Amino acid sequence: MPLAGEWLKNTTAFKTIMMVAAFAGVLAGLLLTLMQQIEVVPLILAAEAYEQPAGLPQPAGGVPAASDGELGSWQPDPGWPRHVFTAAANIVVALGFSLVMIAAITLRGAALDWRRGVMWGLAGYAVFFAAPSFGLPPEVPGTQAAHLLPRQLWWAATSLATALGLAMIVFSRQRAINILGGLVLLGPHLIGAPQPDVPGAAAPAELARAFIAATAITNAVFWLTLGGLLGYFHHKVTT
């Protein structure tokens, strides 16, 4: 029965993809949490000391954070509850990114091992962190920011444009498409990210710069690890 055989083959492939994404996502999410506790969280706590009045903790990742008045009313308590919820959130986010990456690799039909996985992870870092951070760098608590919705829309548009532009540059051999990909890549930055009406921050500039550097390094390690683990596990279960 050809149809039954094809269905079984597709089901097995789907289970393999889900298993690989789950293993890589959980491990990379845990590593991200550990690195945040070492490199990023101390800077957040130091910045919170400058807030008047003391504010609520903001996320440590590269996704635009909410400004005052846009945060929910509930936050985990300091200490272990905060660490547990941070770890859980990081694992969920890592699983999502893992599925997106393995889906892109599967649709591309490219061979995958840990080395190629690292390269895909580097692309993920560029798409989801580096490119958006040029216009919306990670912010310590107490930093004035534009309204949340315009920042989120710009972040999403920049990630999409970066992914599309990189694909046009890397996967096409036509010069015209390469040039168009470069224009798509630069488009959101030429438009510009939403900015606050009155820029300012409670924390010193040195602390803000240290936070940006720590977040950039932490996310780089996360993405390279996620890609490498995807490639490693995928190669193990398919060979």
Image (tube, rainbow, N blue to C red):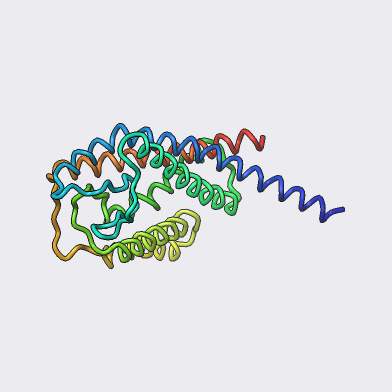
Count of marks, rendered view = 0
Where's residue 216, x and y in %?
A: 30, 43
- Residue at x 61%, y 41% (from the top left corner): 19
Where's residue 91, x and y in %?
A: 46, 42
Horizontal side of 133 relative to 229 (left or right) equals left
In the displayed structure, 118 sits above or below 172; it is above
In the displayed structure, 117 sits above or below 64; it is above
Could you say which quadrant of the image residue 220 lies in?
A: top left
Horizontal side of 153 relative to 51 (left or right) equals right
Where's residue 104, x and y in %?
A: 54, 52
In the displayed structure, 62 sits above or below 150; it is above
> In this view of the protein, which residue sits in the foreground, 48 or 192?
48
Where's residue 9, x and y in %?
A: 74, 48
List the single residue furthest toward the bottom: 191
Could you say which quadrant of the image residue 152 lies in?
A: bottom left
Looking at the rendered image, the quarter that the C terminus falls into is top right
> In this view of the protein, which residue sits in the foreground, 162 or 219?
219
- Residue at x 22%, y 47% (from the top left corner): 140
Could you say which quadrant of the image residue 197 lies in?
A: bottom left
